[in-house]
Image: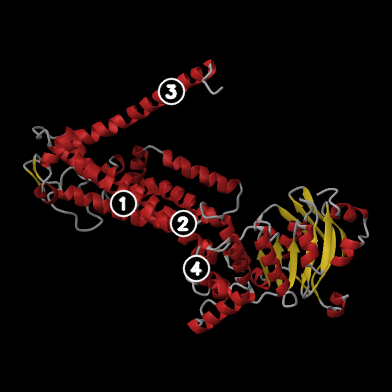
């Protein structure tokens, strides 16, 4: 009565086939990640030392450390965040909580999504035109960071808007019905519950910003600088550009040095991403609905 | 008999005149003329989509959040037209509390839930902890919840049972001192025991507040209201004393609905 019929067996074979096929695809997906990380660690780890992280490059960048580039990347990211986070979060709050649902709002939303799709080299040229030349910031940390900020703005806006919209409508209705204004509702109920998602979005943006090369190479990142930057109007070295330089532009480069730089850069990004995931898990554990 | 003796001619809490409402091109309410007396419980019954919730939601102007809602006619609350341009929406909402179908406590502590409205309307004037405690205790006692939660006021309100959450949602309205409580099927998410407890509470509040309660549950309307309004297809068919409506309905439609022939 309960034995498998011919059709059962056929279906079972087919399902096994698909499970195997889909599993293989997933395996192929993981492969590049494993290979990249494996190669970087295998070839780059021997270069990493205290001196490598905290000394300046010497000998035409073929020896010494990467400290100016590391510091430069951190500075670029921080200044970019200072510009894009307040702007992006404010815009997202307006779009999600205040803006009426009409064609104009929809057009703005569409524009934001499209902004995310603009190639980074186009952002770079915009940065040159707007910040370097028009606002006369020159090629500087400020110009480069603002370019990065414009580029990552859509990520912040979309992440913030999504976490605002994840807050149940019932909470807002409860507030409005007690006579709370929109702002009181946002301040006391919506933001406290959306903050997890916003933070996650911001951190993800950091990791994206840290790796960008094109937007900064014309606007503020330098090939090599003997001195560390003193103000935001100075140029700076940056890890991503430094990686490009030591990989392709300098003859007689020790083979392992670029791998070391790449390993530092990717570790920074991974660290940020893990931090974001950990934070999200921690804060989500405290939520109850 | 008893009801009539205790309710002499009273002022009107809510009165509407030729109230029409459209969602876009769909007309949901037709020429509603209603007079709801102050201090009693009035229930609204009728099949789904008959406009009872829509009516309720126009009384505290929550409908207008939807941009495509259009209204004509007047709604007077305590003798004032609430759609007058000079009317401050915050004051309307303060005067008219609303309880929803699904309990919607805020994801903060029980204590903070009760104090939420109070804090919003008294921002700047810092109340002492003792005053706050008193407000919380009074509100929770009124909704018969104090003894159950007094030892865990700092717990999240979302961890309470649905019945307790709904009672808390009612308690939350009280510190703002509303005159009118609107309830949109307040028991439909609760089990029979919870329903009974919340009905008991609503009955307790009678006299202190004007209560307008939308319900699908005919037995509930009968048990827990003094006057009853029957609506059908966006129109008011009948508005009489509850006992009378269920015993000797004036209209055939009312009789058919009460006897469960449609709905």
Work out whether residue B95 or residue A68 is closer to the camera in this orientation and state it: B95
Which numbered tag is attached to residue A275? Answer: 1
Crowd tier of the residue under label 2, counting other residues whose Cα lies within 10 Å: few below 14, some 14–19, many 20 or above: some
Sequence-first disc among 3 and 1: 3
Task: Identify the residue at image location x=54%, y=69%.
Answer: B113
Residue position for label 2 = A194
Work out whether residue A270 or residue B131 is closer to the camera in this orientation and state it: B131
Number of numbered discs visible in the structure rendering: 4
| Chain name for mark 4 | B
Residue position for label 3 = A16
Which element is circle 3 on? helix
| Cα–Cα gap, marks 2 and 3 | 42 Å
> Could you say where residue A289 lies in the image, as x and y percent from the top left?
51, 56
| Chain name for mark 3 | A
Residue position for label 4 = B109
- Left or right of A201 in this view: A260: left
Q: Is residue A166 above or below residue B175?
A: above
The mark closer to the camera, 4 or 3, is: 3
Q: Is residue A238 above or below residue B97?
A: above
Work out whether residue B55 or residue A146 is closer to the camera in this orientation and state it: B55
> Could you say where residue A245 lies in the image, as x and y percent from the top left?
18, 37
Q: Residue furthest front?
A: A1
Q: Residue B56: which quarter of the image?
A: bottom right
| Chain name for mark 1 | A
The mark closer to the camera, 2 or 3, is: 3
The reply to whether label 2 and label 3 mark residues of one chain is: yes
């Amino acid at each position: 009565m309960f034995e498998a019929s011919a059709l059962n067996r056929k279906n079972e074979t087919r399902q096994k086939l698909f499970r195997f096929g889909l599993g293989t695809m997933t395996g192929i997906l993981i492969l590049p990640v494993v290979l990249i990380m494996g190669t970087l660690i295998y070839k780059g780890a021997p270069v990493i030392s205290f001196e490598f992280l905290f000394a300046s490059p010497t000998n035409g960048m073929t020896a010494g450390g990467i400290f100016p580039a590391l510091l430069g990347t951190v500075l670029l990211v921080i200044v970019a965040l200072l510009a894009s986070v307040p702007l992006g979060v404010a815009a997202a709050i307006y779009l999600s909580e205040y803006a009426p649902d009409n064609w104009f709002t929809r057009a703005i939303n569409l524009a934001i999504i499209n902004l995310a799709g603009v190639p980074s080299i186009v952002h770079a040229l915009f940065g040159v035109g707007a910040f370097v030349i028009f606002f006369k910031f020159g090629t500087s940390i400020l110009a480069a960071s603002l370019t990065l900020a414009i580029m990552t703005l859509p990520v912040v806006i979309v992440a913030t808007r999504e976490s605002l919209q994840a807050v149940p409508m019932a909470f807002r209705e409860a507030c409005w019905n007690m006579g709370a204004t929109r702002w009181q509702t946002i301040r006391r109920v919506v933001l406290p519950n959306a903050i997890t998602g916003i933070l996650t979005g911001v951190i993800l943006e950091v990791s994206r910003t840290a790796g960008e090369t094109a937007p900064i190479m014309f606007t503020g990142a330098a090939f090599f600088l003997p001195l560390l930057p003193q103000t935001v109007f100075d140029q700076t070295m940056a890890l991503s550009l430094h990686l490009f330089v030591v990989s392709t532009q300098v003859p007689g480069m020790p083979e392992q040095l670029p791998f070391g730089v790449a390993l530092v850069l990717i570790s920074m990004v991974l660290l940020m991403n893990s931090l974001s995931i950990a934070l999200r898990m921690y804060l989500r554990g405290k939520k109850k609905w | 008999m008893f009801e009539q003796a205790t309710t002499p001619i009273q002022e009107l809490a809510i009165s509407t005149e030729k109230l029409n409402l459209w969602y876009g091109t769909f007309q949901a309410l037709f020429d509603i003329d209603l007079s709801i007396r102050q201090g009693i419980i009035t229930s609204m019954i009728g099949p789904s989509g008959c406009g009872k919730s829509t009516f309720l939601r126009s009384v505290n102007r929550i409908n207008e959040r939807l941009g495509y809602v259009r209204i004509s006619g007047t709604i007077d609350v305590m003798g004032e037209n609430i759609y007058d341009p000079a009317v401050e929406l915050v004051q309307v909402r303060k005067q008219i509390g609303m309880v929803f179908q699904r309990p919607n406590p805020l994801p903060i502590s029980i204590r903070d839930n009760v104090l939420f409205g109070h804090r919003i309307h008294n921002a700047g004037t810092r109340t002492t902890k003792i005053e706050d405690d008193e407000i919380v205790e009074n509100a929770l006692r009124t909704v018969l919840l104090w003894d159950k939660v007094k030892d865990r006021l700092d717990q999240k309100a979302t961890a309470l049972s649905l019945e307790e959450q709904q009672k808390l949602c009612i308690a939350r309205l009280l510190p703002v001192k509303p005159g009118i409580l609107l309830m949109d099927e307040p028991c439909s998410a609760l089990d029979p025991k919870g329903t009974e407890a919340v009905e008991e509470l609503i009955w307790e509040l009678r006299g202190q507040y004007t209560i307008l309660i939308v319900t699908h549950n005919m037995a509930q309307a009968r048990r827990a209201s003094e006057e009853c309004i029957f609506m059908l297809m966006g129109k008011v068919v009948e508005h009489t004393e509850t006992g009378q409506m269920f015993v000797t309905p004036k209209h055939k439609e009312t009789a058919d609905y009460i006897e469960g022939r449609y709905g």
